[in-house]
Amino acid sequence: MSTRVEWICIAVVAIFWGGYPLVARMTSYGGPAGSLLLALVSLVPVGAAALWSAASAPPTRAQLWPLAIAGLMQGVGLLAFVRLATGKLEASVAIPISDVAMLIVTTVGAILFFQESLTAQKLAGLALLVLGIALLRPA
C-alpha cells in the first residue's frame, strides 16, 4: 500500500471511528442490544468490500485462532465502548480517553510483541497521550 493510501485510510478511520460514537450517543440506545446492532450493520460495508475484492483463500488454522481471539476482544471492547458512548460521562471525556488508552495499549503492545523500535519520538508521543488522559479526566 502506498503512503498516500495509508494516509487516506488514517483519515477515514479518524472520521468514521471518531464519528460513529457521537452518532450512537444521539440515540441513547446502548447496552448489548445496541452493540449487537452496531456489529451487525457494520457487516454491510465489510461484506460489500469482501465481495468486491478478489476472492482470497480462507485463513489457515494458524491464522484462524488469532483472528478468533481478536474478534472476541473486539466484541468485548465494543460492548464497553458503546456503554461509554451512550453513558452518563460527557462524550468529550469518555470517548477520547478510551480512544487514547487504546492507542497506548497498541503502541506498547507493538513494541513488546513485534519488536518495533522504542524511540524518543514514540516515548514523547506516549507521554503526551498520558498527559491528554490526565487533562481530559472527569473532575
Image (tube, rainbow, N blue to C red):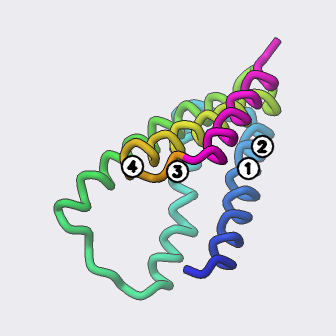
Which residue is at a point 62% across and 39% down the rendered structure image? 123
Residue kind at label 4, given as amino acid type: Gly
Which residue is at a point 36% across and 85% down the rendered structure image? 55
Location of residue 133 in the rendering, given as x and y in whole percent from the top left corner: 72, 27
Q: Are the residues flagged by discs 1 and 2 in contact, CB closer than 8 Å?
A: yes
Residue located farthest toward the top when viewing the structure as drawn: 139
Foreground mark, 2 or 3? 2
Which residue is at a point 78% across and 28% down the rendered structure image? 93
Give the residue number, with chain letter if any, for mark 4. Answer: 71
Task: Identify the secondary structure beneath mark 4.
Answer: helix
Residue kind at label 2, given as amino acid type: Leu
Q: Earlier along the polypeptide chain: callout 3 or callout 1?
A: 1
Quadrant where the C terminus is found in the figure:
top right
Q: Give how far apart the Cα atoms at labels 3 and 4 are.
A: 11 Å
Q: Which residues are magenta?
A: 119-139
Which mark is drawn over residue 22?
A: 2
Viewer-proximal residue, 121 or 101?
Answer: 121
Q: Are the residues flagged by discs 2 and 4 in contact, CB closer than 8 Å?
A: no
132 is within the stretch colored magenta: yes
